[in-house]
Structure formats: structure tokens, C-alpha cells
């Protein structure tokens, strides 16, 4: 279901950084204390710009693309952390044509300025929590110390 209270993203080469809208708590998030606590743990150390649950239907794919604004190496970037929630053994994420085996509950930083794609060849959906945030020294240290990606 689409939240129609949010503005449509503007025409742009890339709007993955979420700068086109103010992030807000929804009623659904407020009824999900665990998800809210995960998001709040990042809000304590940086600015969270966009949070979404992304669902990939069975037997579908996200075609290869890159997100030019989602990388630590990009000045004034926003980065995305990905936390798989539900997946099947037939879902494959590729970064630069290399399979990245993300398991439910793990938190990943991936250099999404590089080419990536997702294939769900299974009979069940894949659901990820994505948290976009402004990278600061706290986040950089967390990524380096925890090997998030």
C-alpha cells in the first residue's frame, strides 16, 4: 500500500537519497516497537532521512541499476543500510555481479553506487527494512568496526 500523504519524488536522475520528502513516523511504525527500536538506534547517532519496508514479490526482479547518491565516497551523500526480514533460498542479491548472501536480521551497508540487482525466483516474497541516513563519523566507525558490508 502506498502512503498517499507523501509527495511524489521529483523528476530527477536519482532520488534514492530521500531528500525529496521529510521522513516521518507512521502509525504502522508506532505499532511495531521492535522495528521502531532498530530505527531509533540509528537516530541516536545520525540523521535518518528515509525508512521503508521493501517487498519483492515471488518470481520478480529488480533490474540492474546503481544509485549515484548512496555511497560513503560521495560528497553530501545519504547511505542505505539494509536489514533483510523475510527471504527464501531462491532470492539472490548481486553487487557488481557477485552474489551477496544477506540473511534475515543482519544489517548491511553496500556500496549501492555500484551496479546491483535482485532476483526472487522463489515462491515467497522477500522483505527488507531499508534505513537511509546521513553518514557521519559515528556511522563510518560503525561500518568499519562491524563490517556491515
Image (cartoon, rainbow, N blue to C red):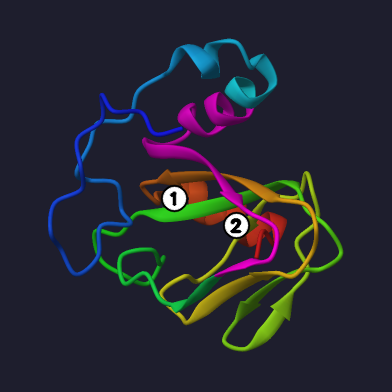
Viewer-nearest residue: 54 or 71: 54
Nearer to us of marks 2 and 1 is 2
**Whether residue 8 is situated above or below residue 92 in the rendered picture:** above
Q: Position of residue 96 (x, y in %)?
A: 57, 87
Mark linked to residue 90: none
- The picture places residue 133, in percent across and down from the top left corner, at 40, 45
- Residue under label 2, please give it: 143
Q: How much space separates mark 2 and mark 1, taking CA atoms?
A: 10 Å
Asked if the residue at tag 1 contacts the one at tag 2, i.e. Cβ–Cβ closer than 8 Å, the answer is no
- Dot 2: what SS? helix
Mark before the other along the chain sequence, 2 or 1: 1
In percent of the image, x 13 and y 51: which residue is there?
Answer: 10
Say which element carries label 1: helix
Question: On the picture, is 10 further left or further right than 129?
Answer: left
Give the image quarter of residue 94: bottom right
In the rendered structure, which segment of residues is drawn in magenta? 38-61
**Farthest right residue in view:** 89
Residue bearing the label numbered 1: 137
Position of 56 relative to 37 (above/below)? below
Front position in the image: 96 or 149:
96
Amino acid at each position: 500500500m502506498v502512503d498517499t500523504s507523501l509527495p511524489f519524488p521529483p523528476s530527477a536522475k536519482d532520488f534514492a537519497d530521500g531528500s525529496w520528502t521529510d521522513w516521518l513516523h507512521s502509525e504502522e511504525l508506532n505499532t511495531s516497537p521492535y522495528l521502531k527500536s532498530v530505527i531509533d538506534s540509528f537516530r541516536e547517532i545520525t540523521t535518518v532521512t528515509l525508512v521503508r519496508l521493501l517487498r519483492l514479490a515471488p518470481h520478480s526482479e529488480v533490474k540492474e541499476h546503481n544509485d549515484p547518491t548512496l555511497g560513503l565516497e560521495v560528497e553530501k551523500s545519504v547511505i542505505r543500510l539494509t536489514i533483510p526480514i523475510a527471504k527464501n533460498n531462491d532470492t539472490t542479491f548481486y553487487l557488481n555481479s557477485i552474489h551477496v548472501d544477506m540473511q534475515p536480521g543482519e544489517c548491511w551497508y553496500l556500496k549501492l553506487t555500484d551496479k546491483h540487482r535482485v532476483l526472487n525466483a522463489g515462491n515467497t516474497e522477500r522483505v527488507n527494512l531499508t534505513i537511509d541516513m546521513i553518514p557521519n563519523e559515528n556511522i563510518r566507525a560503525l561500518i568499519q568496526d562491524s563490517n556491515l558490508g
